[in-house]
Amino acid sequence: MEKRGAGPPTSKHPQSTAFLLAQVGAHAASRFASRLRELELAPAHAGILRIIAASSGISQQVLASRLGMVPSRLVALIDELEAKGLLERRDNADDRRVHALHVTEKGTKAMTDIGRVARAHDDAICAALSEKERASLWSMLTRIADEQELAAGVHPGFARTADVQPPKSAQGQKPRATRSRP
């Protein structure tokens, strides 16, 4: 591994920013999942509810595309959220074959609870940073996410949830779905 500078002398972590991002990201995702369990939700549920709340009436097909998921896997998650009373499928006035997704009143309350959990989670994960450092880190991570062409607000884990990995093409071509191994 190539050394990229002296780094803090007391740090036991490797001199790899990408590795530390992955390590902290995996830790943060795991902790967030634990926190959501108090609401009897999984991270995928929270992400789906957030998008539907922001795009009321979105179709399952459009939602699956936005998340990078195969539609058949999304159906199971939508079924779970509907069974919990957090969202509902309504007939689409323009196309009876399409269901429009809407957050219910109970789902709106769940979104408030998810927001509370997410803020507490963000504070806990970033506890070692000052407000200025948090803002700076956010700014730098946003630049990396933009340069890597990551979809804003969509966790890449949705593609893994669907057992599909959309690779980033080095030639700028549209990514194509490939099967991943568990």
Image (cartoon, grey):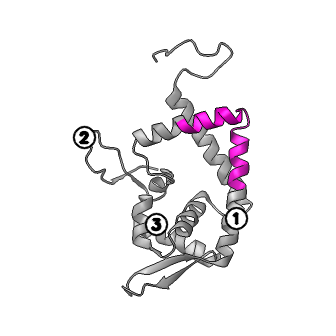
- Mark 2 lies on a secondary structure that is loop
In this view, the mark in front (1 or 2): 1
Which residue is at a point 49% across and 16% down the rendered structure image? Answer: 4
Residue 36 vertical placement versus 74 (above, below): above
Q: Position of residue 113 (x, y in %)?
A: 72, 63
Name the residue carrying label 2: 171
In this view, the mark in front (1 or 3): 1
Name the residue carrying label 1: 112
Which residue is at a point 52% across and 24% down the rendered structure image? Answer: 16
Which residue is at a point 65% across and 32% down the rendered structure image? Answer: 133
Distance from disc 1 to disc 2, alpha carbons, whole Å, reads: 42 Å
Question: In the rendered structure, which disc, 1 or 3, sits on the residue that comes first in sequence?
Answer: 3
Question: In the rendered structure, which disc, 3 or 2, sits on the residue that comes first in sequence?
Answer: 3
Which residue is at a point 70% across and 51% down the rendered structure image? Answer: 119
Residue 25 quadrant:
top right
Q: Position of residue 28 (x, y in %)?
A: 63, 43
The three-letter code of the residue at mark 2 reads Gln
State yes or no: residue 70 in magenta.
Answer: no
The three-letter code of the residue at mark 1 reads Thr
Direction from residue 108 to residue 170 in the image, left or right? left
- Specify start and end residues of the magenta stretch as a single range: 117-139
In this view, the mark in front (3 or 2): 2
- Label the magenta part by its dominant secondary structure: helix
Q: Which mark is residue 73?
A: 3
State yes or no: residue 130 in magenta.
Answer: yes
Distance from disc 3 to disc 2, alpha carbons, whole Å, reads: 29 Å
Residue 11 quadrant:
top right
**Dot 3 and dot 2 residues touching (CB under 8 Å):** no
- Mark 1 lies on a secondary structure that is helix
The three-letter code of the residue at mark 3 reads Arg
